[in-house]
Amino acid sequence: MSSAHTAMNGLRQAVEERPDVVILDLGLPDLDGREVLRMLRAVSRVPVIVATARDDEDEIVRVLDAGADDYVTKPFGAAQLDARIRAVLRRAAEEETDGPIEVGELRVDPRAREAALGGVPLELSPREFDLLHYLALRPGEVVSKRDLLTEVWRVPYGGADKTVDVHLAWLRRKLGETAQQPRYVHTVRGVGVKLVDPGRSPDR
């Protein structure tokens, strides 16, 4: 295990040493932690757990949207951090074993973190990809917004449904559809959403 006291040294170590997981403190002296996260995500898919002193939901959602895999709120104990590390490593291992998923003309490759529709690559943000991947693993299954917040955003408490709505709207736009004229992403009013093959009935 190694540590770095500045953002640039940390980025260098992450690239050169290829660690299994990175614990990123947002309070770095030379760069904002979210900017470091964006820079790291541009060159690596290493699991990242963010350590932050702020526990408000908006801040947590922002760091998760920026590409973090999980977060811990200061102060935290060693046991909690160990549990978080085990969880992100387990998810990373599961993702590595996943092969490409196909739903209609939609293809999602979790190993490469790439998605394509009709052979045309989709330009997705990290969180949009995570959302699409989660839904693609459950074709035809209705997933609640609460489940999406818990499993995709790792936010285990109430609120922030608006975040899910916004990301679903962005995802639909990139899939060439709208909530009013859905093809792949269908809303089940009062329950949640589901990803379906447009060539089959959404009710199947």
Image: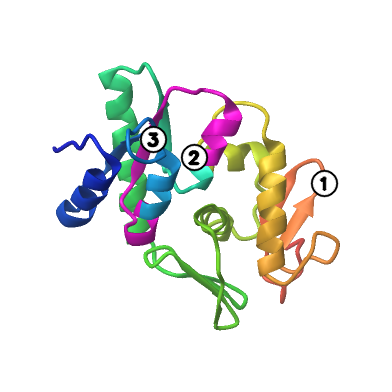
The range drawn in magenta is 40-63
Q: Nearer the viewer, residue 190 or 66?
A: 66
Disc number lying in front (2 or 1): 2
Circle 3 sits in a helix, a strand or a loop, which is it?
Answer: strand
Task: Sort mark 3 into few (<14), some (14-19) or many (20+) by Cα contacts within 10 Å.
Answer: many
Q: Looking at the picture, how far across and down is residue 32, in whole percent?
A: 41, 39
Task: Name which of mark 2 and mark 1 comes first in the sequence.
Answer: 2
In the rendered structure, find residue 50 and report the number of the disc placed on it. Answer: 3
Q: Looking at the picture, how far across and down is residue 197, in whole percent?
A: 67, 70
In the rendered structure, find residue 160 and report the number of the disc placed on it. Answer: none
The amino acid beneath tag 3 is Val
Q: Looking at the picture, how far across and down is residue 82, in whole percent?
A: 27, 28
Magenta stretch containing residue 73, yes or no?
no
In terms of image quadrants, where is residue 148?
top right
Task: Name which of mark 1 and mark 3 comes first in the sequence.
Answer: 3
In terms of image quadrants, where is residue 119?
bottom right
The residue that disc 1 covers is 189
Task: Sort mark 2 into few (<14), some (14-19) or many (20+) by Cα contacts within 10 Å.
Answer: many
Q: Residue at x 26, y 20 (%)?
A: 78
Task: Name which of mark 3 and mark 2 comes first in the sequence.
Answer: 3
Task: Sort mark 1 into few (<14), some (14-19) or many (20+) by Cα contacts within 10 Å.
Answer: few
Q: Residue at x 32, y 33 (%)?
A: 29
Q: Residue at x 38, y 54 (%)?
A: 39
The amino acid beneath tag 2 is Val
The residue that disc 2 covers is 63
Circle 1 sits in a helix, a strand or a loop, which is it?
Answer: loop
Q: Is residue 22 visible?
A: yes
